[in-house]
Amino acid sequence: MSIDLSQFFDVFFEESFEGLDAMESELLNLEPGKEDQETINTIFRAAHSIKGGSGTFGFTAVSDFTHVLETLLDQIRNGQRQLVAEHVNLLLKAIDCLRAMLTALQAQEEPEQQEANELKQRFEAILNGENSTGVPEQAISEPEEQAALPITFQIDFKPLPYLFKTGNEPLYMIAELSELGELETQALHDEVPKLKQLNAEDCYLYWRFFLTTTRGESAIREIFEWVEDDAEITIVQCGGLFEEPDDHSESPNIPLSVPAEAELPVQAPEPSKMVQDNKEETVPVKDARKNTDPSTTSIRVGIDKVDSLINMVGELVITQAMLSQIGEQEITESSIAALQEGLAQLAHNTRDLQENVMRIRMLPISFVFSRFPRLVRDISQKLNKQVELKLIGEQTELDKTVMEKLSDPMVHLVRNSLDHGLETPEERIAQGKDPVGTVTLNAFHQGGNIVIEIMDDGKGLDTEKIRSKAIQNGLIQEQDELTVDEINELIFMPGFSTADNVSEISGRGVGMDVVRKNIQALNGSVEVSSEAGVGSTFTIRLPLTLAILDGQLVQVADHTYIIPLISIVESLQIDIAKVSNVGKGLQVLRLRDEYIPILRLYDIFNHKGAREELDKTLLVVVENDNYKVGILVDDLLAQQQVVIKSLEANYQRVDGISGATILGDGTVSLIIDISGLIKLSGLRRPGSSELLVDLKADEGIPA
Amino acid sequence: MTEHMNLNQQLVLDTETDEKQFLTFMMDEEEYGIDILAVQEIRGWEPVTVIPNSPPFVKGAMNLRGTIVPIIDLRQRFGITHIGYGPLTVVIVVSVTLKEQDKLMGIVVDAVSDVYSISEEKAKDVPDFQDSDNAQFVHGLVNVGEKMVVLLNLKKVLDLHDKSCAKSNGG
């Protein structure tokens, strides 16, 4: 009987990553000296199950590595060892290392061993009591075995008959032993009963090993650690390879009259051959794993959500039964009333069901937030700053796909807050502030959006320097009078991030355009507000889910398109007096102090029969990437929430279109992709080298 | 997903049934056949939503119970004069695998004709008409009784990225 273990890989990886996350967050909660027993237990349990799992699946590198972690944790748990800050640091590094190893294994690659080996040696050094506190790292990382001379051990391993039932396999242990050094194996079979009495599920064989290794006895004990209680194990040092051991009669079960020497050569090769076989066996397992699609992601859903869905489907079925009953009756006035009632109920059920199905994809934002304690800890240590991280609204739920894409921009913002926003403890004391700075992450719902605030109580943005830098970069003119908010907005301009050493002067700006772009790609927005000496707040606004958007239906000739409401700044009738022609075919509308290029949708999309006269049409002013354009449409229709469907799934990508939706009457309507439309229209972005229309520096455009 | 490309392989495996069922339809008084296993459903014509800047034979997108399905006019794809659509116009929704992705697409034809069991061997009799743009769409020709049926290579017909089709699009 062979079970294809690869089918369980996904679950193992998922659980292991969860375990690592749990270990990490618990470790960060630990304060050395004041550790809580339950916390240590949680960390231990997570390590233990990762070790067990990886052992089961044959990821020995992982299980070996986890084993030393576990041993240390076990000692701390039992009170044999005091937890010190160094342990926490080391454990955190080990978690990173494990995560990297597991990620590599999941991608079916060989995990990087070097870091794991170094860390493992440091753990072993601690475990061997050579230093439990404060010895410089170099001393710890010095591998102990290099100094050690090879010693031969005699190991008697006599498993109790029920060993197999505990899920342990001596073969693996022998394989592990053989990795420690030179191994001579004798399989002893004098307890194997006659065939008739033999119970195939019991273990009758036992073994005597002679192992010549530079590793200490503890390394050997480790291998047998899992079966300690299920076997008799004696480990004795002996001088030479085949010398008779100084048997302290600790192994009464091993008969001293070892079966005739002649048998040895016959017996010995067998296990080693089996070991080899075993190694070959692992190859198909790896291959099998390749068949499983690594891109399939899963989602864990609370049972309460599933329960409520089942309830709703139940109600839906009842409503359906009711409606079909009415349908069978003769149509009378009363049956019509009943029908209407039934339909109303159906509508209600459907809406509930939709909301709840959507909710399945929603996860609490703590999935993103949870990575920040570690990040803040590491960065603040590096920067020598004291930081307290406050997390508020961790239970606020957000669509999983949005969440995945939110993480990088947030990391960037938090890192900036720590690096540039917060002052050093000395500076803070000098300003009469608490030496410990605070970074707050706050998430809450507002309307149909989720709002995430990243606040720090640092020095705030230096508006003067941002301004002078922006003038230097040509983003604004010397004479431009900007409000503080407008100046702060400049840090999101693409030109700003490419400027050299701006980050050292102003403190902010590196890659902020990328942050904004990523958030805009999720149909969201990001703003900053800041007060000198008090701190800065970045506010991210996102739609709750990517699958639904608020749309403005517009009409062009016979066609109905949807413009995402979030992009729309305003819609207006065109005052022809304010329209100017720029070069060949481009018209701009002067709107207050801005020039808005007019995009003729019917032209870009090659539609005939649209209204072309500017005074009979409407202009929808949209903003994309800080750049405003006006889209010319025949008419504005309703605003409504639309479910986004892929056009690409069955067709192909269409320039200027981001997707499709189905309107209430069952017809398909296409959703306009603003940035794609601008590209399609041939209009260039301002600020780029191919500048055609500029918003602020408008010398090129006749007024 | 079954396509013509797989037909031969299947036949090698399954020698007992060397006959394959084809749905045939009429177009400009000719009869064309497609593998019946690719056919998802047959619908009447209904107005579709125009997809901007698409080739003329792509009539637009249709809502098929929540899925957006592109509709392709087979006459225009073959360069045959376009005729108006009426109540008898038929849309055959087919499933094809293009670039390892299963796609649902609709083809507009004049009328559905029949279902024939056709032996693959008979269909191998393809004349060499290299000069024709449409040759690439043809999988084979087969005689059913007195009639000739053109078996189509749906994958070619529906692969809109294929550059070799570009000239038959007519822009």
Image (spheres, coloured by chain):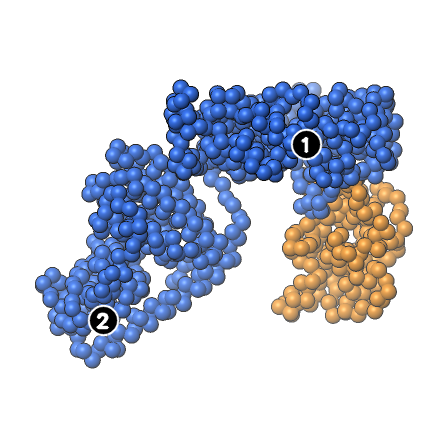
Chain colours: A blue, B orange
Residue shown at the point (22%, 59%) measured from the top left: A216
- Snapshot quadrant of residue A392: top left
The answer to which of B44 and A51 lies nearer the viewer is A51
- The percent coordinates of residue A94 (x first, y second) are 36, 47
Dot 1, how many residues are within 10 Å of its Cα: few (below 14), some (14-19), or many (20+)?
some
Question: What secondary structure is marked by label 2?
Answer: strand
Residue A79 at what x, y percent from top left? Answer: 20, 40
Q: Check the picture and name the quadrant holding the N terminus of chain A.
A: bottom left
Which residue matches tag 2? Answer: A186
Q: Amino acid at mark 2?
A: Gln
Foreground mark, 2 or 1, reads 1
Q: Toward which corner of the image does residue B35 lie, by quadrant?
A: bottom right
| B115 sits to left or right of A34 | right
Q: Is residue A108 above or below residue A519?
A: below
Q: CA distance from mark 2 to mark 1?
A: 82 Å
Characterize the local packing of mark 2: few (<14), some (14-19) or many (20 or more) Cα atoms within 10 angstroms: many
Q: Is residue A25 left or right of residue A335?
A: left
Which residue is found at the position 41% from the left and 63% from the top? A282
Number of numbered markers: 2
| Nearer-the-camera pick, A98 or A534 | A534
On the same chain, marks 2 and 1? The answer is yes
Q: How far from the left and from the top, in percent, is residue A583? A: 85, 34
In the image, what residue occupies the spot 22% across and 76% down? A264
Q: Amino acid at mark 1?
A: Gly
Dot 2 falls on which chain?
Answer: A
Q: Chain under label 1?
A: A
Looking at marks 2 and 1 on the same chain, the residue that comes earlier in the sequence is marked by: 2
Q: Quadrant of residue A184?
A: bottom left
Local secondary structure at mark 1: loop
Q: Which residue is mark 1?
A: A474
Q: Is residue B90 something that shows in the picture?
A: no
Q: Is residue A297 visible?
A: yes
